Amino acid sequence: MKIVAINGSHKGKAGNTNIMVTAFLNGAQTAGAETVNIFLDEKEIKHCRACKACWFNSSERCVIKDDMAEIISLMEGADILILATPLYFDNISSMLNVFMDRLMVKASPYWEKDKDGECRHLTTHLFPKLIMISNCGYPERSHFQVISHWMRRVARNMSTEVIGEIYASQGTLLSNKVEELRPIISKYLQGLEKAGREIVTDMRLSEGTKKLLEQNFISDEIYIQEVKKFADNMLKK
Ligand SMILES: Cc1cc2nc3c(=O)[nH]c(=O)nc-3n(C[C@H](O)[C@H](O)[C@H](O)COP(=O)(O)O)c2cc1C
């Protein structure tokens, strides 16, 4: 099985999103998957020009010369595509959005109606199954509503399915070095590794793993107090 992760965090390897993705991919590798981890902040990806040359010129390639061709070739043969992003203004990051527009090259210019009577691109290339990995600053899980909905809409449009959604609220704690937090974060990362293994063996996450990955690290009240203390300290500097 081949798994390709696209990390849309503007902090790249130094980000909280990467902490999640790395743990998940470690688990997947243990279970025998080939993994590719791509950081969009290290790539040059220009905006889609909406010229549709990728649909209608004979080469079926994008006319823009940047790193997208390399990423598309790394995606070849992927069974699973992980889209990973921090939550930015209740949505995916702009970097990931720019990348997604460039996947036009993977969609057919022809349409069909799905079983619910909604149009989608005709399936000419098999699109990988999708997993979303995201984290946010706020403590509630409701902040992931837009991302979760968007992911399902993309899967429908590309005739594939979402086989896993992993969201960490209080995500800023993932990289926090406070001693008392380390066992909690370490348990969460073990849960992510287990999720990676489960996806390879079962193509789904078990209910137990989903539950483990939905738990907040600390109480909302303490978290909000700590965020306030952090902001006070930073503003004093
Ligand atoms: C531009 C920007 C917008 C953000 N918007 C939100 C938001 O709407 N809700 C939220 O809970 N966190 C928000 N955050 C916080 C990030 O999601 C959070 O810090 C996350 O851990 C960043 O992940 P990273 O380290 O991989 O970049 C925002 C951060 C930035 C920089």
Image (cartoon, grey):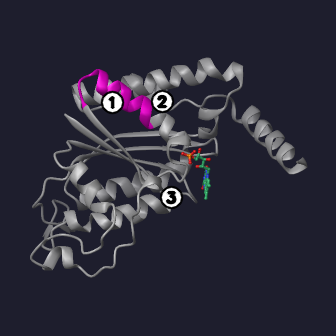
Q: Residue 56: x percent and y percent? A: 14, 79
Q: Is residue 75 magenta?
A: no
Query: Counting residues from the N terminus, which is met first, the one under dot 2 or under dot 1?
Result: 1
In the rendering, which numbered label is found on residue 91?
3
Q: Which residues are magenta?
A: 21-33
Q: Residue 125: x percent and y percent? A: 12, 58
Q: Residue at x 31, y 58 (%)?
A: 154
Q: Is residue 29 magenta?
A: yes
| Magenta span dominant secondary structure | helix
In the rendering, which numbered label is found on residue 213?
2
SS at circle 3: loop
Query: Counting residues from the N terminus, which is met first, the one under dot 3 or under dot 1?
Result: 3
Q: Is residue 93 left or right of residue 183?
A: left
Q: Residue 25: x percent and y percent? A: 36, 32
Regarding residue 206, the answer to whether it shows in the image is no
Report which residue position mark 1 lands on. Answer: 205
Q: Contact, CB < 8 Å: mark 2 with mark 1?
A: yes
Residue 112 is drawn in which quadrant?
A: bottom left
Q: Residue at x 27, y 82 (%)?
A: 51
Within 10 angstroms of label 3, few (less than 14), some, or many (20 or more) residues? some
Residue 225 is drawn in which quadrant?
A: top right
Gap in angstroms between the C-alphas marked 2 and 3: 20 Å
Viewer-proximal residue, 122 or 229?
A: 229
